[in-house]
Amino acid sequence: METKAFSNLMKAIMDGKFVYTGELEPHKTADITDVVEWATTLKNTGKIVAANVTDNPQSMASISSLAASYVIQRDSGLEVVYQLRCSDRSRMALFSDLLGASMLGLRNVLSLTGDHPATGDAPQSKPVFDLDSAQLVELVHNMVYEKKDYAGNEIHGPDIQLNVGGVANPGLDPVEPEVIKVARKAHAGADFIQTQVIFEVEAALNFLDMLAEYTDVPVLMGIFPPRSYGQASFFDKFVTGVTVPKDLLDTFKKFKEIEDKAKRKEKVDEYNITYFVDFIKEIRKKKNSAGCHIMAVGYPDVIAPIITGAEGK
Amino acid sequence: MIIVEQKPLEEILGYLKPYKKVLVVGCDGCTQPPRSLREAKSMAMQVEMGSKLEKKDITAKATTLVKQCCKDSVAGLGEMLEGVEAIVSMACGAGVQTLAEAFHPLPVFPAQNTMFIGSAEHNQGDLVEKCQACGDCLLGYTGGICPVALCAKGLMNGPCGGCYQGKCEVTKEVTDDQGNVTTIQNDCAWFMIYERLRDQGRLDLFKTYRPMRDARVSSSPRSIKWA
Amino acid sequence: MESSSIMEQAVKIDSTYCGECINCITVCPFEAVTLNKDKNQVEIDPEKCQACGICYGSCPSGAISSAYYDIRALLEQVKNGLESGRSALAVTCRGSAPEPEELAEIAGVGSPDDLINILLPCVGRVPGEFYLKAISEGVQKIAVVPCGTDYCRFGKGSIVAIAKALMLKNLINQFGYDRNAIIIQPNEIKIDINPYKCIGCGNCEYVCPKDAPYLVSPGVAEVHDEKCMGCGRCISVCPAFAINLKGSDYKSISNLIGTLSGSTADKPSLLVFCCSWCEYDALDAPITYEDVDVKFIALPCSGRVDELHVLEAYQRGFDGVLVVSCKDSSCRFAEDGTAAETKDKVRKIKKKLDSMAVGGERLDICLTYPNYIRQFEPQLRVFADGIKKLGKTQL
């Protein structure tokens, strides 16, 4: 079936452009002014086509990602990728939220299984997981292309306009079961894949190659330019599947010794730009590599230079 | 087997406050650890001695049934019930309810918490969950490893991104009866499924997308026509 | 409960009398006796020694001494027996002792009252000299009742005992006695499982250190007879009272508790569940105190300690229960010891006692090594003092 592009993101991907997405994280508060500001900053770089709005990340409930997505897109003008996890909603709740999203003009939805509530701030909570991320992808796909709900009932009225993405974690060890799972999502109807942060270019290339054996779904590789040694080592130690190369860690450790803050930042920025420009240049050689998802929340300074660098020949 | 865990004696004594003559009924059926005559005797003694703490004098007899969940066989309690004011059942929830219905208006109290359907990992002395009685067995597709019972999220299309080196992102803290807390990181069910199917040369099953399940088969209360 | 006093070995060797014949090295089942070539003397490694006494019984020069069942003590028993009109002697391993009537039949005497009954851990420890002296003192008949050769808890004890007895039969024959004055009758006490009671839970299969019981369809346990070593651990976990072990089944011990609980009116009373393979002194001549009443029940292994019996002890009026278990390496049944498991069992019962009108502090476990003497009594005294302070239970 011909994939339809409803969002700018999907249009760009289908036009063969190498796209960049950003990350927005609403908090446990009813106010998202700061997130809108960050979205505006991303928009103003002129290089970010859309940004993800997270849904209760790490199983700590924050403001509804549907409400936040709508307000952010309306107020900043930046297209959003509305994230939706299966941890907290049954298929009925997911479906009704998706109808709402389509009505509100959200055009990208990213399907996630979601962290288990036991890992978050309310381990007492009952996990839902009525669907998993692949099944959620299928639900969206059926809504869009068949105009059917979760039980095959017809959806009346206007067409549903949503492009659905899936996620992947290319740094997992071993990676084969992950690759097969991502292929299942593609099979279920995922329009694109965004990945968890990855630092090692070899692993990223390997993942793209392995996935290409199963499907040609476009992949946006996740990157995270760290602002400090602490941040880099946090990812290395605590984020599942993420390994930070020793060279990078060592260099960032050395930067810690630079006392002058501005100078230190300059060094860090410079390193990040070089590192990720090289990284992106490598991965975009792969056919199924469609872009980069840059998760540099609160670190705008390097985004534009990285993208400019990667776009230059 | 049905895994059970004894309730604190205080809770059981709490139920028994209004009564003086009690019958403790074991079950020879599927409870694990076994809750037969030995455990019933022990419970009877615990109740008797425990009641002295409250300056009470409960007399507790002990007996056992082959299967407490079998309506026909519980009738065998007959004479044992003479003068008895309350029954303490050592069975799983099904047994307790069968007795409660069979001997109404005699009150029946559970001595156990019914935990799960599981098996004994004898080398560690652990009893672990294996089946959630979901009503739609998938084991034929998953290499004999149940993702409903063993995946923390019960995913149909795993593993999720929380699986790293075969381990699940979900850890649980287990407090033993000495108060020692150990953190257990579960094995990722989907990773085990992957390995098993790979080793059996059946990865095609792992590659197959599994659509949404029909939750009706697992929606309580359930019953089936047997005879 | 841990012992703190100085460790004194039960079996020692005095090199001044040793002729380095290395008999002891040959018979030791635990490789505890070695020849130190530098010093040219035979030594006993106290860590490996299990105080079975087999070396003691095999030493031709009297260089080895044993704190338990020394020949003089044994002969004293014989003399006393002869004086009270008994004419036959039975030397029996406590690990497989037949009932008194059965023993009388083996010895070919009319009643158990005609028997001088010597019960000891391993018949292999008895020196040949003892039998000869007993005969010369006037004993008419000797029944030697070791365990079956594969049932010996010390490995070689039974073989040594039988070989020694056979040799003595020939020897006395040459001196003109009837060879049948010495009767050899090995015995074994093993579990049997009542299939009509068994509920097929598999508990016995799980706890057995020797993998003797096994489940068969449709849900009953059977026993590999040759594997059972009679520790009784399975009985203490059988939910259906389906397992029997002569002398150690639920009812026998329960009855014993009832009998022992009779005389405890005014002073606090203790019940000691003691493994048969340690604290021989305490079992043969139970320790008594003025201020606290102490009763002993010998178990085939501390693994036989039964929650029901412990609870019953309190219900029948005992104020404290002490479990005596061999320390890990000394366990006669399980390679990794029984102590850890028994400790665990005791801890769980203690917890239950806490929620009853008893209190967990009235139960304790005491670990001892049979190869060190005088370790137990001080611990018993400490426990007795504790119970004395607590007084009678509220039951």
Image: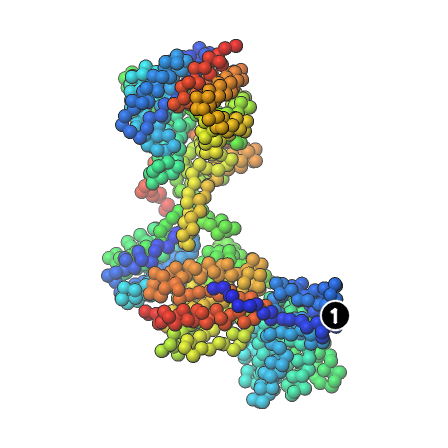
Residue at (45% x, 30% y) in the render:
A230
Q: Residue at x 47, y 66 (%)?
A: C323
Q: Is residue A63 visible?
A: yes
Image quadrant assignment for residue A51 = top left
Q: Is residue C120 above or below residue A313?
A: below
Left-right relation of A125 to B183: left
Residue that carries the numbered disc 1 in the rendered image: C20
Chain of the residue that carries numbered disc 1 in the rendered image: C
Colour mapping used in the image = rainbow
Looking at the image, residue C342 lies above or below residue C168: above
Q: Can you say whether C6 is above or below B123 in the image?
A: below
Residue at screen point 71% across, 79% down: C169
Residue C165: image x %, image y %?
A: 68, 76
Where does residue B174 sit, x and y in percent of width and height?
A: 42, 47
Looking at the rendered structure, the secondary structure element under dot 1 is loop
Residue in front for this viewpoint, C156 or B144: C156
Residue in the picture at 27% in, 64% down: B54
In this orientation, which residue lies closer to the viewer: B99 or C15?
A: C15
| x then y, percent, for residue C210 | 57, 59
Residue A207, how many percent across, how many down? 52, 24
Instruction: Give the quarter of the image for residue A246.
Output: top right
Q: Quadrant of residue A3?
A: top left
Name which residue type carries label 1: Glu
Nearer to us in this view, B98 or A291 = A291
Does any portion of residue C92 appear in the rendered image?
Answer: no
